[in-house]
Image (spheres, grey):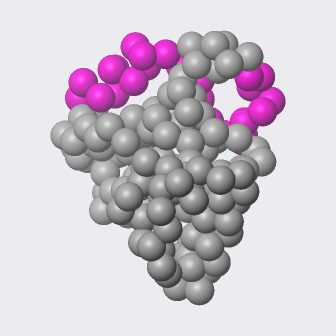
Amino acid sequence: MSDAKKLAIIATKGTLDWAYPPFILASTASALGYDTQIFFTFYGLQLLKKKLCLQVSPLGNPAMPMPMPVPVLIQALPGMQAIMTSMMKAKMKKKGVASVDELRQLCIEAEVKLVACQMTVDLFDFKHSDFIDGIEFGGAATFFEFAGQSDICLYI
């Protein structure tokens, strides 16, 4: 057994804004010497797909900083999610924030173990070929085996 500290993360969200925390925390922990694993379940599986098509939803997100206040009723209009996603991507690019693809690749290079929940894969009729190479598939027991020995466990 390794003496390295362990970080276990459960990623359950599949939107652009929720994609950043697990990859940033995992890559940072790995750089600090932690043995790190992310378990992707339910909507979090979107983060492991070969083709990322992540969006940010302005609905139910009152803390989302906007150039000007946008009433909730306007946020619910068709096309607003695409507009908000474009605005967020443009802001991130302007500020030099790495893309989700780049952060995901950084995690792979840093040997962060990426585990897709097999039960959720089956539930949503996904195929293993839908996902990037280099990930593992496992169930809750796979996660608990690692998380039970972790120093830090985060639910995102």
Is residue 95 visible in the rendered structure shown here? yes
- Residue 134 drawn at (x, y percent): 66, 40
Residue 64 lies within the magenta run: no
Residue 140 lies within the magenta run: yes
Of the pair 137 and 34, the residue shown nearer to us: 137
Q: In the figure, residue 98 lies in which quadrant?
A: bottom right
Q: Quadrant of the N terminus?
A: top left
Of the pair 12 and 62, the residue shown nearer to us: 62
Report the label total: 0
Q: Quadrant of the C terminus?
A: top left
Q: Residue at x 59, y 86 (%)?
A: 94
Reply above or below: 130 against 62: above
Is residue 23 visible in the rendered structure shown here? no
Reply above or below: 10 against 78: above
Q: Residue at x 36, y 62 (%)?
A: 63
- Residue 2 drawn at (x, y percent): 28, 39
Q: In the figure, residue 99 lies in which quadrant?
A: bottom right
Left/right of residue 86 with respect to residue 108 in the rendered view: right
Q: Residue at x 46, y 35 (%)?
A: 12
Write down the region rendered in magenta: 126-149
Of the pair 124 and 150, the residue shown nearer to us: 124
- Residue 43 drawn at (x, y percent): 56, 33
Q: Residue at x 57, y 79 (%)?
A: 91
